[in-house]
């Protein structure tokens, strides 16, 4: 899409373009009918859960093909037309053929499991050895060829998922400029927030978040270094799970940091996130960090989900720097705390987190050193590529300023390029401080002293206005402690401010995903606060600020 088209936010009507949506649904209905399948619930597929889709296929009311066709029609009607969400950077030309093969397999052998025939959208920094590109949103990687599927893509295909396409992202997973606009990439343009089209989707898994919220897929996969799953999940009123670093393989994913990077589920329900995590987790010989997860990853994370899962839990509330920056966010958190107590949790408020403001500079140092090292290794491993080093990426951007640098620069890339090897004292000192202050003297110390099962806090403030001139102005959030520690966190919809989503994050120790999922599920079931987007041109100020 051209930048001129991207800038026409004022042209977008408040709500859906009825003609475009109607024609898309008609095409999907016609396709399903022509293959002998009808979908009585077709009008509601944008909110369908994995269980509902599986039931539809098991009863013969749907097929993998009819479901994929429905989502493809919705994408056609609403992603580049209608409200122009611009969340999907590329569609998989083999998606329907894959769906047909899975339908035939179901008839012959039965289902592989809860992901059989399910359409999934994945972030465009996750490698697929098929007809699609893997570019991290950068024009510098257009035409590059990966040696194989990312390990998590292998897991998805083995589980019977239909890889529907790739989602847009903040270019290079938002590690290019100090004042970028989240959700923008040179290849994909700017992704819009389905809850208010002039608001930001947050980064860097912006397209995965917006696509899942808009009903373009059943579930999506994002990646995170610090906030890039949970923040866009919050801004799109989704459940987003950032796993323990090493629970999911990173092989085949364009990297920033081998000490903080991870992929993770972005879904509309906790149950769906648990299903997707069960598929994605696994030991990969190509990612040594996953060796530690052997015996810790569960084959089925849904088994621990319990409506009464908060009863008897001890929950610590993050305050200090994690609160006070947004009155509406604080109000939503206060209501959430009441729910936790009503559901039988013992709430420790406040739960101080030592050193939470002390490792920001060290984190940045670690990321800069690791980005250079890890990206150079990734680029060198490609079958072919226009660029092979970070230095060549920087040079490409400079020679393509009109398409890559027209809105913001590449200061972070330049800073990373200036760093030395991972044997440098500055790197080793920063890494040691990050691990110690975030882990043993941070999250672990607080949870041990207060005998906590989890920490909770606002994931962040409501989504801000997108600004390609001055860049992001997102406020504080609770993402960094778990990111630096490499520990898990999950965000769940908790409320709205003038219709803009606000999420509550549950944070725990390493490999505590089963417990966090149980707590998040109980909170979700007690509140059921999530509502689908209305694709408004801007926020509706007649709605109250917060519940």
Image (cartoon, rainbow, N blue to C red):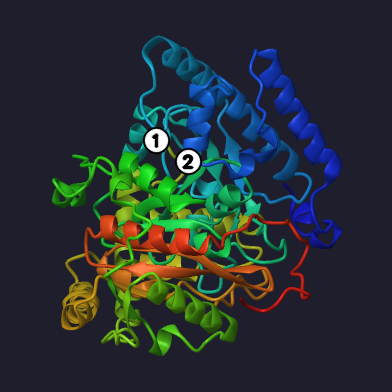
Image side of residue 390 versus residue 452, left or right: right
**Dot 1: element:** loop
Q: Quadrant of residue 97?
A: top right
- Quick one: label 2, few (<14), some, or many (20+) residues within 10 Å? many
* Residue 184: % across, % down: 60, 58
Contact between marks 1 and 2 (CB within 8 A): the answer is yes
**Dot 2: element:** loop
Q: CA distance from mark 1 to mark 2?
A: 8 Å
- Quick one: label 1, few (<14), some, or many (20+) residues within 10 Å? many
Q: Nearer the viewer, residue 104 or 485?
A: 104
* Residue at the spot of label 1: 146
Q: Residue at x 54, y 77 (%)?
A: 332
Image side of residue 354 versus residue 137, left or right: left
Q: In the image as oriented, which residue stretches furthest toward the top? A: 108
Using the image, determine if residue 238 lies above or below residue 495: above
Using the image, determine if residue 47 lies above or below residue 255: above
Total marks placed: 2
Q: Residue at x 65, y 76 (%)?
A: 470
On the question of residue 134 being in view, the answer is yes
On the question of residue 228 being in view, the answer is no
Image side of residue 464 versus residue 136, left or right: right
Using the image, determine if residue 169 lies above or below residue 71: below
Q: Earlier in the sequence, mark 1 or mark 2?
A: 2
Q: Nearer the viewer, residue 541 or 395?
A: 541
* Residue 17: % across, % down: 83, 47
* Residue 440: % across, % down: 16, 77
Q: Residue at x 30, y 55 (%)?
A: 374
* Residue at the spot of label 2: 134
* Residue 326: % across, % down: 56, 84
């Amino acid at each position: 899409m051209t930048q001129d088209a991207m800038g026409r936010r004022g042209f977008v009507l408040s709500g859906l373009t009825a003609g475009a949506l109607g024609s898309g649904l008609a095409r999907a209905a016609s396709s399903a009918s022509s293959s002998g399948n009808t979908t009585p619930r077709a009008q509601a597929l944008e909110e369908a859960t994995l269980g509902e889709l599986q039931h539809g296929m098991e009863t013969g009311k749907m097929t993998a093909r009819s479901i994929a066709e429905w989502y493809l029609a919705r994408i056609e009607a609403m992603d580049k037309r209608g409200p122009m969400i611009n969340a999907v950077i590329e569609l998989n030309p083999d998606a329907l053929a894959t769906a047909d093969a899975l339908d035939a397999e179901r008839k012959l052998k039965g289902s592989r499991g809860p992901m059989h025939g399910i359409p999934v959208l994945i972030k465009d920094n996750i490698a697929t050895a098929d007809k699609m590109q893997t570019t991290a949103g950068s024009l510098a990687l257009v035409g590059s060829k990966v040696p194989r599927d990312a390990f998590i893509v292998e897991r998805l295909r083995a589980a019977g998922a239909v890889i529907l396409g790739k989602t847009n992202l903040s270019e290079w997973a938002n590690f290019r400029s100090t004042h970028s606009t989240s959700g923008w990439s040179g290849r994909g343009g700017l992704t819009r927030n389905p809850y208010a089209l002039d608001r930001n989707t947050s980064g860097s898994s912006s397209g995965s978040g917006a696509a899942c919220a808009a009903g373009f897929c059943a579930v999506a996969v994002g990646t995170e270094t610090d906030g890039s799953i949970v923040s866009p999940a919050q801004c799109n009123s989704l459940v987003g799970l950032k796993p323990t670093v090493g629970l999911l393989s990173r092989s085949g994913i364009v990297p920033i940091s081998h000490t903080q990077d991870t992929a993770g589920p972005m879904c509309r329900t906790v149950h769906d996130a648990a299903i997707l995590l069960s598929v994605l987790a696994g030991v990969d010989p190509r990612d040594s960090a996953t060796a530690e997860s052997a015996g810790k990853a569960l084959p089925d994370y849904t088994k621990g989900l319990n409506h009464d899962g908060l009863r008897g839990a001890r929950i610590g509330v993050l305050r200090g720097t994690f609160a006070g920056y947004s009155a509406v966010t604080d109000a939503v958190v206060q209501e959430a705390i009441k729910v936790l107590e009503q559901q039988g949790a013992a709430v420790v408020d406040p739960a101080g987190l030592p050193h939470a403001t002390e490792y920001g500079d060290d984190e940045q140092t670690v990321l800069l050193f690791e980005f250079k090292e890890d990206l150079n290794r990734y680029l060198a491993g490609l079958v072919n590529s226009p660029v092979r080093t970070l230095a060549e990426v920087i040079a490409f951007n400079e020679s393509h300023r009109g398409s890559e640098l027209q809105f913001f620069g590449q200061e972070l890339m330049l800073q990373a390029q200036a760093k030395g090897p991972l044997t440098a004292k500055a790197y080793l000192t920063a890494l040691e401080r990050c691990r110690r202050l975030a882990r043993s003297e941070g999250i672990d110390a607080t949870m041990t002293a207060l005998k906590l099962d989890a920490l909770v806090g606002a994931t962040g403030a409501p989504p801000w206005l997108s600004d390609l001139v001055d860049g992001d102005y997102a406020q504080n959030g609770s993402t960094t402690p778990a990111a630096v520690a490499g520990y898990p966190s999950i965000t769940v919809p908790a409320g709205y401010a003038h219709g803009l989503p606000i999420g509550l994050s549950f944070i725990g120790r390493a490999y505590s995903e089963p417990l966090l999922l149980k707590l998040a599920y109980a909170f979700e079931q007690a509140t059921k606060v999530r509502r689908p987007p209305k694709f408004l041109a801007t926020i509706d100020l007649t709605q109250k600020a917060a519940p």
